[in-house]
Amino acid sequence: MVKCLYAGKVTWLDVDCGTGKMAELGSEHAHRLVLSDNSSDMLDIAKKQDVSENTKCVLKSVQETEYENEFEVVAEIQVFHYLTARERKRLLANALTP
């Protein structure tokens, strides 16, 4: 979907990235990729994925994630259903570029 919506590379945030399975796909289409998770063990595994030098790993829970209009893509796999409607709205409103 990212490839269809954007002609070039994007800024990409993967919240609660787990083992970083999206990292390989994300790094292929992103000039900046942030992998965020609240587990240092998961981030250690994610760092071993085939990611680019533009990838940054952040130890932080999705509820603590605070960005200001920095990302064109916010990926969440099996995360949003754990959040309240207010938490989902805050994350997307703050993280996505206008």
Image (cartoon, rainbow, N blue to C red):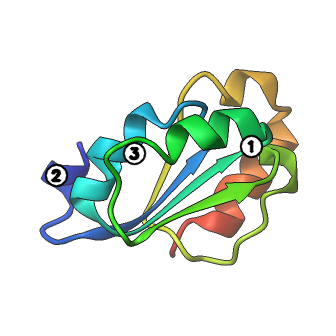
Mark 1 surroundings within 10 Å by alpha-carbon count, few (fewer than 14), some (14 through 19), many (20 or more) = some
Residue 66 seen in render: yes
CA gap, disc 3 to disc 1? 22 Å
How far apart, in angstroms, are the residues tagged by discs 3 and 2?
Answer: 15 Å
Classify 66 as above or below 49: below
Callout 2 secondary element? helix
The x, y position of residue 50, in whole percent, is 31, 46
Q: Nearer the viewer, mark 1 or mark 2?
A: 2
Callout 3: 10 Å neighbours few (<14), some, many (20+)?
many
Q: Quadrant of the N terminus?
A: top left
Q: Position of residue 88 (x, y in %)?
A: 74, 43
Q: Nearer the viewer, residue 89 or 8?
A: 8
Q: Residue at x 52, y 40 (%)?
A: 46
Earlier sequence position, callout 1 versus callout 2: 2
Q: Tell me which amino acid carries mark 2.
A: Lys
**First in sequence: mark 3 or mark 1?**
3
Q: Check disc 2 and report the residue beneath it.
A: 3
- Residue identifier under label 1: 88
